[in-house]
Amino acid sequence: MLVVIANDLPPAVRGRMKLWFVEPRANVFVSGVKDSVAKKVVEYLYKHCPPESGLMVFRQTS
């Protein structure tokens, strides 16, 4: 499971997140992706989001 909470995401990143995640509230994303996919998503977020995005990532590992 992967939960991402952000203050402000770039529009391209937010659009891509909506493909894989459920967005119960604005800038709160929840998904049950596999561990390997979760790792790639977190790497993508760190690479494409500026520090002002205020990312908080919670990841459950098996």
Image (cartoon, helix red, strand yellow):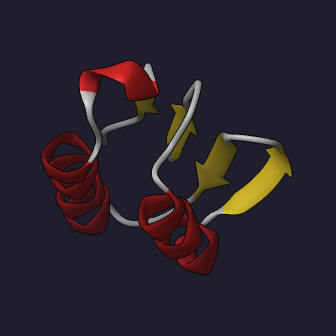
Toward the bottom, the furthest residue is: 19
Would residue 56 be visible to someone looking at this image? no
38 left or right, relative to 7: left
Looking at the picture, does residue 36 appear above or below residue 51? below
Q: Residue at x 31, y 38 (%)?
A: 61
Q: Residue at x 31, y 56 (%)?
A: 38
Q: Position of residue 2 (x, y in %)?
A: 48, 44
The residue nearer to you, when weighing 14 against 41, is 14
Q: Residue at x 45, y 52 (%)?
A: 10
Q: Position of residue 22 (x, y in %)?
A: 74, 61
The residue nearer to you, when weighing 39 against 47, is 47
28 left or right, relative to 62: right
7 left or right, relative to 58: right
Q: Residue at x 28, y 57 (%)?
A: 35
- Which image quadrant for residue 53? top left
Quadrant (top left/top right/bottom left/bottom right) for the C terminus:
top left
Looking at the picture, does residue 26 appear above or below residue 44? above
Would residue 20 be visible to someone looking at this image? yes
The residue nearer to you, when weighing 29 against 9, is 9
25 left or right, relative to 1: right
Looking at the picture, does residue 21 appear above or below residue 29? below
What is the tally of numbered marks visible in this picture? Answer: 0
Q: Position of residue 26 (x, y in %)?
A: 80, 42
